[in-house]
Image: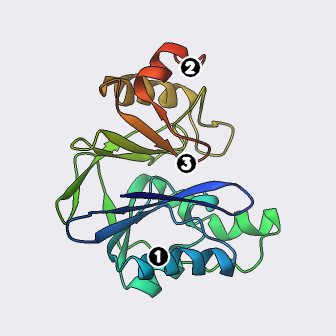
Amino acid sequence: MIQIFEFSPFHENTYVIADEATAEAVIIDPGCYEQAEKEALGQFIEANKLDVKYVLLTHSHLDHVFGVAYVKRKFNVNAYLHELDMVIFNDVPTRCALYGLRGFEPSTIDAFLKEGDQFRFGNTVLDVLFVPGHAPGHVAFVNHAERYVIGGDVLFKGSVGRTDFPYCNHADLINSIRSELFTLPDDYTVYPGHMEPTTIGTEKQTNPYVK
């Protein structure tokens, strides 16, 4: 089961991935900012009797980590991020202040993930791909059995991730898409960090930035 929540003024996609056989689950990129958003996420998990095992982060731009402290505390789980993204994660409070976003609760990362890691919950396995560019430690999570990728802000329907932020690199972004994401089969669904899903094949054929 994949449940998508659109949170915060940045319209960020937060994902709850649940193994239907065991009800074990992960939360990817908890972007819940307002208290009502946090409660909506918590109530969904409780209503479905899900057992959250991990908080996984594709990267640490502020809109993807607003709810990390909440979900860690609520479900007593560890948060995982690529080590190269810590420079961004540690700067989130400053960025929130620049945006005038008050009430952000800082948090901590408990362990670093890396390319080739696997996260297992129930019978579900997510493989970690290293796809830098939009952020230096950006990763994607691939479920080969169910043929999808949780891609964060790398590849969108008809677009790609921004590279005008600090620590971004456009050449790295395009290389990540071509050498990592575009080597996946065409029928794999891409669940991005913003906007609606697409497929690898559609973007290979029509995306003007990486055709």
Q: Gap in Å between the C-alphas at discs 1 and 2? A: 36 Å
Q: Is residue 158 above or below residue 43?
A: above
Residue beneath the point at 57% across and 29% down? 170
Q: Which residue is mark 2?
A: 207
In which quadrant of the rendered image does the N terminus lie? bottom left
Q: Which mark is residue 108?
A: 1
Answer left or right for 68 relative to 94.
left
Q: Is residue 103 above or below residue 91?
A: below
Q: Please name the amino acid that badge 2 sits on.
A: Asn
Residue 99 locus on image (x, y percent) = 80, 62
Residue 17 locus on image (x, y percent) = 37, 60
Q: Which mark is residue 25?
A: none
Q: Is residue 36 above or below residue 159?
A: below
Disc tally is 3
Q: Quadrant of residue 113?
A: bottom left
Q: Gap in Å between the C-alphas at discs 3 and 1? A: 21 Å
Sequence-earlier tag: 1 or 2: 1
SS for dot 2: loop
Residue 100 locus on image (x, y percent) = 83, 68
Q: Nearer the viewer, residue 36 or 89?
A: 36
Sequence-earlier tag: 3 or 1: 1
Q: Is residue 67 above or below residue 146?
A: below
Q: Are marks 3 and 1 in contact (CB under 8 Å)?
A: no
Q: Please name the amino acid that badge 3 sits on.
A: Gly
Label 1 CA crowd tier, 10 Å (few <14, some 14–19, many 20+): some
Q: Which residue is mark 3?
A: 193
Residue beneath the point at 16% across and 60% down? 123
